[in-house]
Image (tube, grey):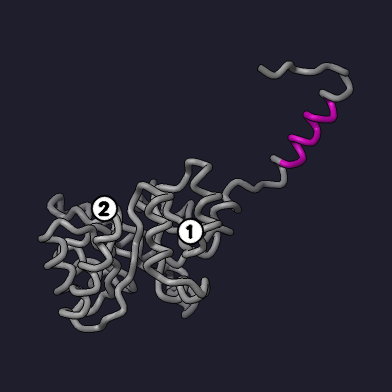
Amino acid sequence: MKFFVDTADVAEIRDLAATGLVDGVTTNPSLAAKTGRDFLDIVTEICALVPGPVSAEVVATETDGMLRQARALRKIAPNVTIKLPLTPDGLRACKTLSDEGTMVNVTLCFSAAQAILAAKAGATFVSPFVGRLDDIGHDGMALIADIVQIYGNYPAFSTEVLVASVRHPIHVVEAARLGADVVTLPPKVLRQLCAHPLTDTGLAAFLADWAKTGQTIPEA
């Protein structure tokens, strides 16, 4: 499973990329707005930090505008992935861009029917929002199970399932269990994956026992 980090905070991305655990980045207009910085500058910096796909979202709502913005964004770096909404206009733009060899992330997916359309349009990634479905009393992970199963029925579909709106580590574990290709995580959730109280207490006990020996391990 690939891990993308879901933020436009360049400092956070730099810190997490240094771990070697980050395969890509997703951004959106809301995340970019929180930084107060120029969006193109942010995307340029992120693309230099992370060699994998970096999703940059258009803000036009009709196909021609989406295509114009997409063609400007993809000039930034080869790893820019154009993020498009799952609307009729977005799907038309997706088909055109995919045919041109541009990576596309179709976002705001909330149903298996929508995911089928994204795959038919040639999307590189489809982003089902599990957390937002959970928020309204639906089962977000059930949607992931449906999409993974459907895509598996059709070898011609090359679209990867990118689990988005992840709220906690259990979403990540469930996505992996179901066979999703990618999860995009807020920095906080990515760090939470490493945390466990028994790891902390175990390490403290090991260090305490080692200190009693009075020994040291030389450093090269």
Magenta residue check for 208: yes
Is residue 71 located in the magenta-colored stretch of the structure?
no
Task: First in sequence, mark 1 or 2: give its number.
Answer: 2
For the question of whether residue 169 can be seen, the reply is no
Q: Where in the figure is residue 196, as x and y percent of width and height?
A: 67, 46
Q: How many marks?
A: 2
Q: Secondary structure at mark 1?
A: strand
Callout 1 crowding tier (Cα within 10 Å): few <14, some 14–19, many ≥20 = many
Quarter location, residue 111: bottom left
Q: Which residue is mark 1?
A: 185
Residue displayed at 75% across by 17% down: 217
Residue 130 horizontal side relative to residue 72, left or right = right
What residue is pinned by disc 2? 78
Q: Residue at x 12, y 60 (%)?
A: 100
Measured as percent of width and height from the top left, residue 27 is found at: 41, 66
Instruction: Please determine whether, in this image, residue 202 is positioned above or below residue 157.
Output: above
Q: Is 157 in front, or is 6?
A: 6
- For this orientation, the residue located farthest to the bottom is 62
Position of 215 relative to 6 (above/below):
above
Disc 1 to disc 2, how far (Cα)?
A: 23 Å
Residue 1 appears at what percent x and percent y? 39, 46
Residues drawn in magenta: 200-209
Q: Are marks 1 and 2 in contact (CB under 8 Å)?
A: no
- Name the kind of residue labelled 2 in the image: Pro
Q: Nearer the viewer, mark 1 or mark 2?
A: 2
Can residue 126 be seen here? yes
Name which residue lies at 18% across and 73% down.
Answer: 67
